[in-house]
Amino acid sequence: MNTLAMSLSNAVTKQSPQMPLKTVRVIIKGRVQGVFYRNWTVENARELSIKGWVRNRRDGSVEALFSGDPNSVQEMEARCRRGPPAAMVTALDVVPSDENPGDGFDRRPTV
């Protein structure tokens, strides 16, 4: 086997299998606007390497899309149930999604 073929063979065998991604859309209800919730969500999502977005909704809730390693997404859901210190979360609705999360984690305008 030539050197190039050996290198390619080694590279293929050393690659880890791609972890399946989990993508969910989340609606957070309660006292979640005016309490730094969106910025807190951006910081936590980036810390967990989650892709997606977060935005306020005119009905007073916060909506987010989380996509990443299933364990990281589950951890993000748990963190959102608590929220930042000034928040009071009363409900967290989570539904699976097939929406493209994009390349990073962004704060979007209110809808």
Image (tube, rainbow, N blue to C red):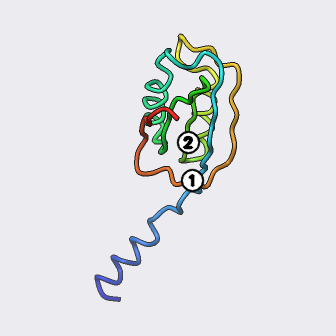
Q: Position of residue 108 (x, y in %)?
A: 44, 37
Q: Position of residue 52 (x, y in %)?
A: 49, 44
Which residue is more in the foreground, 10 or 72?
Answer: 72
x 68%, y 29%: residue: 92
User: Dot 2 lies on which element?
Assistant: strand
Q: Are marks 1 and 2 in contact (CB under 8 Å)?
A: yes
Q: Earlier in the sequence, mark 1 or mark 2?
A: 2
Q: Residue furthest top?
A: 86
Q: Which mark is residue 26?
A: none
Name the amino acid type tagged 2: Leu
Name the amino acid type tagged 1: Glu
User: Dot 1 lies on which element?
Assistant: loop
Q: CA distance from mark 1 to mark 2?
A: 8 Å
x 64%, y 33%: residue: 27
Which residue is more in the foreground, 50 or 111?
Answer: 111
Q: Position of residue 7 (x, y in %)?
A: 33, 76
- Few, some or many C-alpha atoms within 10 Å of disc 1 (few <14, some 14-19, many ≥20)? few
Q: Give the tally of numbered discs.
A: 2
Q: Which mark is residue 99?
A: 1
Q: Position of residue 66 (x, y in %)?
A: 55, 42
Above or below: residue 89 compared with residue 24: above
Q: Residue furthest bottom?
A: 1
Quarter containing the N terminus: bottom left
Which residue is more in the foreground, 94 or 75?
Answer: 94
- Few, some or many C-alpha atoms within 10 Å of disc 2 (few <14, some 14-19, many ≥20)? many
Q: Which mark is residue 65?
A: 2
x 48%, y 35%: residue: 45
Above or below: residue 2 compared with residue 42: below
